[in-house]
Amino acid sequence: MMTAREFLDQYRVAYSKAARLEAKLDQLKEDYGSVQGGIVYASGKSGISKPTEQKVERVQAAFDKWANAQLDAVEIRQEIFEVINSIDDCKTADVLWYRYLGLLTWEEVCDAVGLSWYTVHKMHRKGLELIEQLIN
């Protein structure tokens, strides 16, 4: 059984993973210069040299990993959004949304909802209890 905090933190983890993979992809593209791809013929032979073909394959594999991580993050975000959106107390839902989907710091959450640190944390605690009931 997953806790409410674990459920909500899934997006932050997935988003971070996708960002790391994007940085690796960007670095790989930069390292390889202008490698944009090549034409692979039906015979399995390509119109590019073997080292360049291997670079293209590495970039494509990195791109595929990044794209899958992005898709996972979007799916997790949607699931969390639906749960948060089902909370009747709009301010509590806002606190959860800004913190877990907006990825804001606590100070930024307080500014966004216009409430004190104490009130925001009280609402957060209430929100976690509501989420716990909704997911279990």
Image (cartoon, rainbow, N blue to C red):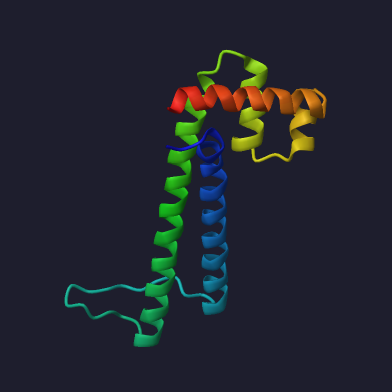
Q: Residue at x 69, y 22 (%)?
A: 123
User: Could you tell whether 116 is left or right of 13 in the image?
Assistant: right
Residue 50 screen position, x and y as percent: 34, 86
In the displayed structure, would residue 108 be above or below residue 14? above
Q: Residue at x 43, y 46 (%)?
A: 72
Farthest front residue? 1
Farthest bottom residue? 50
Q: Nearer the viewer, residue 62 or 11?
A: 11
In the displayed structure, would residue 113 be above or below residue 41? above
Q: Nearer the viewer, residue 69 or 40?
A: 69
User: Which of the 4 quarters of the picture holds residue 60?
Assistant: bottom left
Q: Residue at x 52, y 54 (%)?
A: 18
Asked whether residue 131 is in view, the answer is yes
Asked whether residue 84 is in view, the answer is no
Quadrant into which the N terminus falls: top left
Farthest right residue? 116
Task: Count the labels in the image.
Answer: 0
Residue 38 screen position, x and y as percent: 35, 74
Quadrant into which the C terminus falls: top left
User: Could you tell whether 85 is left or right of 65 in the image?
Assistant: right
In the displayed structure, would residue 44 be above or below residue 85? below
Q: Nearer the viewer, residue 92 or 4?
A: 4
In the displayed structure, would residue 75 be above or below residue 46? above
User: Which of the 4 quarters of the picture holds residue 9?
Assistant: top right
Farthest left residue? 43
